[in-house]
Image (spheres, rainbow, N blue to C red):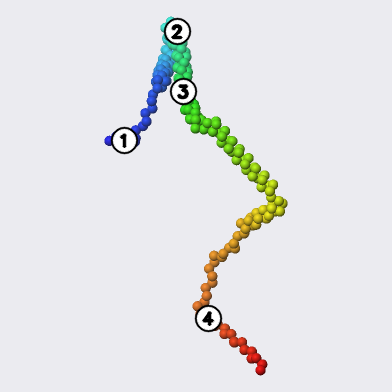
Amino acid sequence: MGNIFGRKKRTRVTEQDRAVLQLKQQRDKLKQYQKKIHLQLEKERLLAKQLLQDGKKEKALLLLKKKRYQEQLLDKTENQIGNLEHMVQEIEFAQIEMKVIEGLKIGNDCLKKMHEVMSIEEVERIMDETQDAIEYQRQIDEMLAGSLTQEDEDAVLAELEAITQGEEEELPDVSTESLPEVPEDEPEKKPVKLKPKPELVAAS
């Protein structure tokens, strides 16, 4: 049984991706060619020097002409590499632009759906209702302010003060310490007997 959960999601390769890959491969081949020619030119320069030392001036001159021609080819190769790298950058930037445009399109579609749910008329209605509620509350405040006398205002303030003070009052803290123990050998107190009051005898 295969590992279903372990499968990686395959990324779709576009024509632009293939083009970028091919351009980079061509660029790398040109760089390898450059490296090879540089090594060959160095060997030919040393060989030309040896030919001059051996008195073979004509052969050394011919070798140096060949070397000069190869150097010109290297300059052209450098320009070609620059063109390839520029082309790669252009394609990659175009891919980024396409992703940005796709993102903008998705965002635009989302906004359209939101506007369909919440139209301009709906927003205006909500704003009007909110303004009406604010105006209604203002009218109530004005009515209450005009119907109360100074005595009523003082009474309202006094009641508010009383409520505030009531909320600020706190019960005293109850001690959490344990009470002292009563000794076991302490004699119990006997109740005190009250003497009966003398009765008054009426005079005969």
Q: Report the front residue among 79 and 162.
A: 162
The amino acid type found where label 3 is placed reads: Met
Q: CA distance from mark 4 to mark 1?
A: 89 Å
Q: Secondary structure at mark 2?
A: helix
Left or right? Give the position of 184 relative to 39.
right
The residue furthest right is 150
Could one spot residue 34 in this view of the protein? yes
Q: Picture coordinates of residue 182 (x, y %)? A: 52, 75
For image coordinates 57% across by 33% down, the residue present is 124
Circles 1 and 3: CB atoms closer than 8 Å = no
For image coordinates 48% across by 24% down, the residue present is 101
The image quadrant where one finds the N terminus is top left
Q: Picture coordinates of residue 55 (x, y %)? A: 43, 7
Left or right? Give the position of 121 relative to 40.
right
Using the image, tell me which numbered label, if any, was put on residue 98: 3
Q: Picture coordinates of residue 31 (x, y %)? A: 43, 18
Q: Report the front residue among 86 and 171.
A: 171
The amino acid type found where label 1 is placed reads: Asn
Residue at the spot of label 4: 188
Residue at the spot of label 2: 65
Q: Report the front residue among 163 and 93.
A: 163
For image coordinates 62% across by 58% down, the residue present is 166
Q: CA distance from mark 3 to mark 2?
A: 50 Å
Label 4 CA crowd tier, 10 Å (few <14, some 14–19, many 20+):
few
The amino acid type found where label 4 is placed reads: Glu
Residue at the spot of label 1: 3
The image quadrant where one finds the C terminus is bottom right
Image height of 109 relative to 73, above or below: below
